Amino acid sequence: MEEIKGKILWVDDEIDLLRPHIRFLTEKGYAVDTATNGEDAITMVKQTVFDLVFLDEMMAGMGGLRTLAEIKDLRPNLPVVMITKNEEESLMEEAIGVKISDYLIKPVNPSQVLLACKKFLEGRKITGAAVSKDYIQEFNQISVALMNDLDHNQWIDIYARLVSWSSEMDDHPELGLKQTLVDQFRECNLAFGKYVERNYRDWIERSDNRPALSPEVVDRFLIPELNTGKSVIFFVIDCLRLDQWLIMESLLHDYFEISKQFYFSILPTATPYSRNAIFSGSWPSDVELRHPELWEKSEDDESSRNRYERQFLDKLLERRKIILKPEPKYVKILDAEFGRGIEHNINSYAQTKLTSIVVNFVDMLAHGRSDSSLLKEIAPDESAYRSLTKSWFVHSSLFGMLRTLSKNKNVTVLLTTDHGSIRSLRGSKVLGDREASTNLRYKYGRNLKAEEKAAIFVKNPADFKLPKRGVAGNYIIAKEDYYFVYPTDYHKYLNQYRDSFQHGGVSLEEMILPVIKLEPKG
């Protein structure tokens, strides 16, 4: 017996005229019941589970709109397609107001009716099949691409495609392809780690044929906006991944014209290095030479690692001979209450030529998930982590600020991040002296040793333009999804930090970062 594709109720006071359509749908595998008035339709909806309702707008007795309202009271999620002769805009708006799913204009033809059935009864299955087919094709293309010597633009493209597919898989978990995508991400990160290890030193020495890097963000993306007649609000969201940004972007299309570019974070992909590099326009070793007292304080005092970003940016603009009146403003949002205050006053900041706003919540979310079993339960994987990011953003002061700024045609919003994060799943034992740092994705100290497959070894910090850590100091930087654990209480910390979102290492998620330009639609 052929499987029924869906159960349909067709309500029309001239139902006999629609028998050819009903036979057509029956032949296509749908079961169709009929009613000639609203009262009978409501009784049938109470007694039978239908998958779709076709509802005539003009019927004797209880009209279509009233019938629609009562059906929605009984079955809020039951899709209802209104069929009408009336093309007046007011009717359409009224029908939409009572949650109509779609409407057809009489006289309807079989193909219109069939399309509506497929849309509401088979749409997910059809879309899922197309997604599955397209991803398998994409999977093969990416696998072939990894055999080649890719440049930074090709890596950006591959990462963007993988992130896009992650979103598709979130919408179609029934396809069973999520693990395949996870495995491909891991394969790509393996190749990406080798790519970075081969090329990173050359990127430091040259300015062509390489990605934009953290020290160039202000020069490349921010300063050109200062040469326009508009005020610039420069948001830096700590620890924001591309997939998290795309969740946020989907909520901003109604407010802004959105354009996107990319840059690569320097190594280590951690706040003291990457964010200080953004605001200073300098490599960490250059910051150490130019501002030894600032670097010393920002490194040795954990509570003030990035306390001097305002000074770094002021000195960078001074070196570029850029004088702004009134003076640029700088704000760092560390808690929700302070963020609400900035949100309420954001229009006053928009009167200044340049305002930089650092938002720390996403970084706090990543660290909080590591320390909280409740957050890990709420966000057990990347898909749930994206969902949690969306929940935060929808209710955040950041979204409120952006909505307000979208009404100001004299403002350009530039938004970026200092580094991303990766879900760390593989622990790697590391040896070092007791003075070595405790970071999970990178470490500095003397005589550091780790598995070769898990790390990039930086024997001479100057090669990576990193600050010196004593005469014999060296760095190790994790690749792929590895995290470093010392032998002391090894299994305790191995389990404690497994499946946590960390940053500091080499991965697509940590290094390839968006720079977003938001121009108000008005």
Image (tube, rainbow, N blue to C red):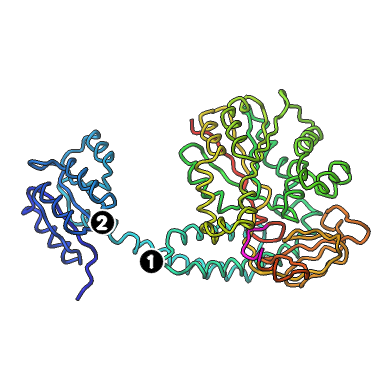
- The structure residue drawn at horizontal position 19% and vertical position 41%, both measured from the top left corner, is 65
10 Å neighbourhood of mark 1: few (<14), some, or many (≥20)?
some
Query: What residue does disc 2 label?
Result: 115
Name the spot of residue 478 as percent of width and height, x first.
73, 64
Looking at the image, residue 173 sits to the left or right of residue 467; the answer is left
10 Å neighbourhood of mark 2: few (<14), some, or many (≥20)?
few
Name the spot of residue 27 as percent of width and height, x first.
16, 66
Query: What residue does disc 1 label?
Result: 129
**Which comes sooner in the sequence, label 1 or label 2?**
2
Name the spot of residue 264 as percent of width and height, x first.
69, 53
Residues in magenta, as a range: 496-502
Q: Amino acid at mark 2?
A: Leu
Which quarter shows the N terminus? bottom left
- Residue 127 placement: quadrant: bottom left
Q: Is residue 69 visible?
A: yes
Compared to 216, does 132 lie above or below?
A: below
Pick the front one: 50 or 405: 50
Number of the label disc, if any, that sits on residue 230: none
Pick the front one: 64 or 103: 64
Helix, strand or loop at label 1? It is helix
Pick the front one: 26 or 362: 362
Q: Is residue 232 magenta?
A: no
- The structure residue drawn at horizontal position 64% and vertical position 51%, both measured from the top left corner, is 513
Looking at the image, residue 431 sits to the left or right of residue 138; the answer is right
Name the spot of residue 175 as percent of width and height, x first.
42, 67
